[in-house]
Image (cartoon, rainbow, N blue to C red):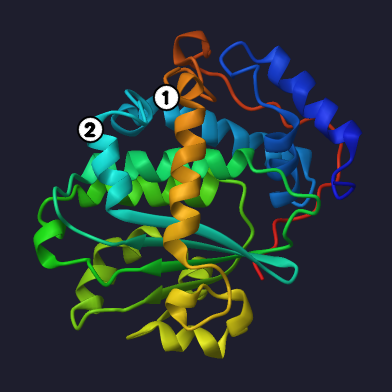
Amino acid sequence: MAQVNEKDINAIKDWLAKEPYLPKHMDDIALRKFLFSCNNSLERTKRCIEEFCTTRAYMTEVFCDRDPLSPKLQKAFANTCVTTYLAGVDEILIHKLTSTENFEFYDLIKSFMLQADQWIRLERDTLPENHIIVLDIKEYTLAIISKSNIFYFQKFLIFLLQGMPVRLKQVHVVNCPSYIDYLYGLVKGALPQDIRDLIKFHTDHNGLHQHIDKKYLPSDYGGEAEEMIKQSLKWIEDIKALRKTYLDDTIWKADLSKKAKNGTVDTAMSGSFRALAID
């Protein structure tokens, strides 16, 4: 992982050590991903990590009570597929709702963030240059929308955009229903224009083939890569194996009681101050 300078990793560690409200147990794998996603800018990396940690403290509905063996989360895992595939120098991240049975809005987001945390822990010899997001919304019915907290979901999307270590290149929404304009309208206002410009909507998965080589896509989408369910089940087993870690509600979470009311992020450190690039 020579893409990230060890001095920059140590600089972020030193910064975390000096901030009493931020966690001290972020490992090198996570820090490398944050730095690389921010183009090795120490200034932007600090802002991203602070957003990542403080939002986790505010969103207690998602980042507390995260026992992966609990019946609620077992149901949520059973209703989703979350997978990742390397695509040349890029990485494809796919989220698919497979069933609306026993749908619970907060449990669904909670299960997704457990999988996202597991992804952050995933070590790569070479970090992907960019990320391609695929959202399969075939099962997004109007009935589950009525059971969802749209305002909360908007805030959650902002957290994903500002606090997660990703470099967005493309966003594809597949298997769109006839009422996709209504669904998109619920969240469109929360998205910056540069993110909106990356989003493409497809009535089925075949639209992906115009943008992504089929050899990188799962067999579910007419590709040559491993089918989604096999990988998703492996992810869930890996999460269960780290149950003790995820039972700790303080993991990667800011302690807001220790944050000064007028505290600001110290961005005075030097580093590679390149602007974040959205391809």
Q: Classify 163 as above or below 86.
A: above
Rendered location of residue 257, percent (x, y)? 45, 9
Q: Nearer the viewer, residue 10 or 88?
A: 88
Classed neighbour count for the residue bearing mark 2: other residues with Cα under 10 Å, few (<14), some (14–19), many (≥20)? few
* Quarter of the view holding residue 85: bottom right
Q: Which residue is mark 2?
A: 71
Q: Residue furthest front?
A: 230
**Which image quadrant: the C terminus?**
bottom right
Residue 279 showing in the rendered view? yes
Q: Amino acid at mark 2?
A: Pro
Left/right of residue 147 with respect to residue 32 in the rendered view: left
Residue 212 showing in the rendered view? no
> Which is more foreground, mark 1 or mark 2?
2
Alpha-carbon span between mark 1 and mark 2: 24 Å
Q: Amino acid at mark 1?
A: Ala
Residue beneath the point at 47% across and 17% down: 250
